[in-house]
Amino acid sequence: MVNVNADTNFKTNERTRETMLQIGNYNHLTIARITPAGACLSSSEGEVLLPAYLVPRGAEPGTTLEVFIYLDSEDQLAATTKKPKAVVGEFALLRVKDNVSVGTFLDWGLGKDLLLPFAEQSNPLRRGEKVLVRIYLHSSNRIAASTRLEKFLKPADTTLAEGDEVDLLIYSFSDLGAKVVINNAFGGLLFRNELFINPAYGERLRGYVKKIREDGKIDVT
């Protein structure tokens, strides 16, 4: 009998299935076999190892697990049941751990730190400070971070309408007000006369679409 832990989301399937991997995101993969090193999970890219200390109690061949997929320090596919602070395609406020020759390492909640390359940094960073980044998948399949947020933001599309309630993330300030990420996808502006509080860099708020301009720029309130 499988012992389902409250912190683990998995279920038992009758047969192993190969699943297309999403590197940098959560995947539901089935255990093909269990070895002393851990559980070998079946995928379209071959087997992916979930280390033994992370295998849920009671899991067995045929059990499907929710795991996060990334490349380890040897650039090999690896799985973990731990949850990072954000996945590929999301924005997150992360703490700087160290600067190295190729960039800055950020703490994102996994054993392997997240690299913020120097080319993706707007300003030099100091150990211990927090920086708002967008997590992306490099062409090499390595997960990386960027502080150049605006290149990931797009103008309004048909999914937005004036009056919609939206999620806001404060990422910059100007003389006009606060620049915001809207619904993790769009760029917008919260004008200074609409600021009834003093939001902080990296703060998340709820707001409303006030106006969508012809060029796709968005004003929020």
Image (tube, rainbow, N blue to C red):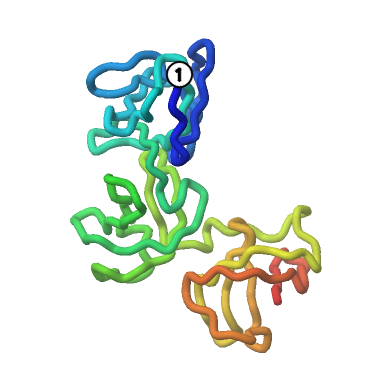
Q: Which image quarter: residue 197?
A: bottom right
Q: Nearer the viewer, residue 203 or 35?
A: 35
Q: Which image quarter: residue 104?
A: bottom left
The image shows residue 159 at horizontal and vertical percentages of 75, 53
The image shows residue 218 at horizontal and vertical percentages of 70, 69
Residue most extreme to the left? 101
Picture quarter with the N terminus: top left
Picture quarter with the C terminus: bottom right
Q: Nearer the viewer, residue 154 or 40?
A: 40
The image shows residue 75 at horizontal and vertical percentages of 28, 33
Q: Which image quarter: residue 31?
A: top left
Query: Which residue has dot 1 on it?
Result: 1
Task: Name the residue at 31% across, 56% down.
Answer: 107
Left or right of 165: which side holds 89? Answer: left
Left or right of 83: which side holds 126? Answer: left
| Number of numbered discs | 1
Q: Is residue 81 above or below residue 153?
A: above
